[in-house]
């Protein structure tokens, strides 16, 4: 079959449009699959027995030490602008809600950059090395959050920097168990 030259541009345009639709569909489907796998893998973890190593310290943070308080585990990195945006929001939110314990779990970052960043912060976050836990859970990306109830069980998760959604989930977490 021979294509008439006057229809060539139309043919290429249709092919490009179909390819774009396939790429968008595949990306959305893949992202949803990753988020679901993350939720499934975190549901299998006993969060109340979790232990994470502090950054630049030989000690570890045991989640059992925070039992009775609502906890947010924030996977972040200094090279991620979206992580920095969420960290700034969490700093403000935590200032108004000091009962929320924030574990800032740094992912795939250099120790010098982390220490420099931490030294500049005026917050009560627990800064830990989150890379091993991040990899174990197959977290789809940074920033990502795990919200933990006062009894040490999973409340919710979130992937990305949707601050409005995160604020709503945090407020629900704080209301729960009061």
Image (spheres, helix red, strand yellow):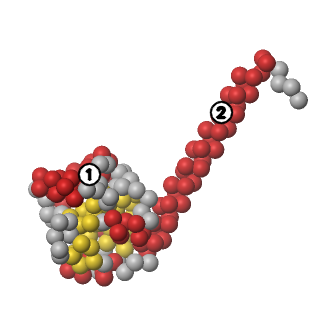
- 69 on left or right of 14: left
Image quarter for residue 43? Answer: bottom left
Image quarter for residue 118? Answer: bottom left
Whether residue 29 is visible here, answered yes or no, is: yes
Q: Which residue lies under the disc numbered 2? A: 16
Quadrant location of the N terminus? top right
- Count of residue discs: 2
What secondary structure is found at the residue carrying circle 1?
loop
Q: How far from the left and from the top, in percent, is residue 127?
A: 20, 64
Mark 1: few, some, or many residues within 10 Å (few <14, many ≥20)?
Answer: some
Q: How far from the left and from the top, in percent, is residue 158?
A: 39, 60
The residue at the point 44 percent across, 78 percent down is 44
Quadrant location of the C terminus? bottom left
Is 28 rendered above or below residue 56? above
- 84 on left or right of 17: left
What secondary structure is found at the residue carrying circle 2?
helix
First-in-chain label (1 vs 2): 2
The residue at the point 40 percent across, 66 percent down is 135
The residue at the point 48 percent across, 71 percent down is 40
Q: Which residue lies under the disc numbered 1? A: 78
Q: Does the residue at mark 1 contact the one at mark 2 (Cβ under 8 Å)? A: no
Q: Residue furthest right?
A: 1
The residue at the point 31 percent across, 49 percent down is 80
151, 18: nearer the viewer = 18
Q: How far from the left and from the top, in percent, is residue 122?
A: 11, 56
Task: Tell me the CA gap for discs 1 and 2.
Answer: 37 Å
Mark 2: few, some, or many residues within 10 Å (few <14, many ≥20)?
Answer: few
Whether residue 100 is visible here, answered yes or no, is: no
Q: Which mark is residue 87?
A: none
Q: How far from the left and from the top, in percent, is residue 16?
A: 65, 33
- Nearest to viewer (mark 1 / mark 2): 1
């Amino acid at each position: 079959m021979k294509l008439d030259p006057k229809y060539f541009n139309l043919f290429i345009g249709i092919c490009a449009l179909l390819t774009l639709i396939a790429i968008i569909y595949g990306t959305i489907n893949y992202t949803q699959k990753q988020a679901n796998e993350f939720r499934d893998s975190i549901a299998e973890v006993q969060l109340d027995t979790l232990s994470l190593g502090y950054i630049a310290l030989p000690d570890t943070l045991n989640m059992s030490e925070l039992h009775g308080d609502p906890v947010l585990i924030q996977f972040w990195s200094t090279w991620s602008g979206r992580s920095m945006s969420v960290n700034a929001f969490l700093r403000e939110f935590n200032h108004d809600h000091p009962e929320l314990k924030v574990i800032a779990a740094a992912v795939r970052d250099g120790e010098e950059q982390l220490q420099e960043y931490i030294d500049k912060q005026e917050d009560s976050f627990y800064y830990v090395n989150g890379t091993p836990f991040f990899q174990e859970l197959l977290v789809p990306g940074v920033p990502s959050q795990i919200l933990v109830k006062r009894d040490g069980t999973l409340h919710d998760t979130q992937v990305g920097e949707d601050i409005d959604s995160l604020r709503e989930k945090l407020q629900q977490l704080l209301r729960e168990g009061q």
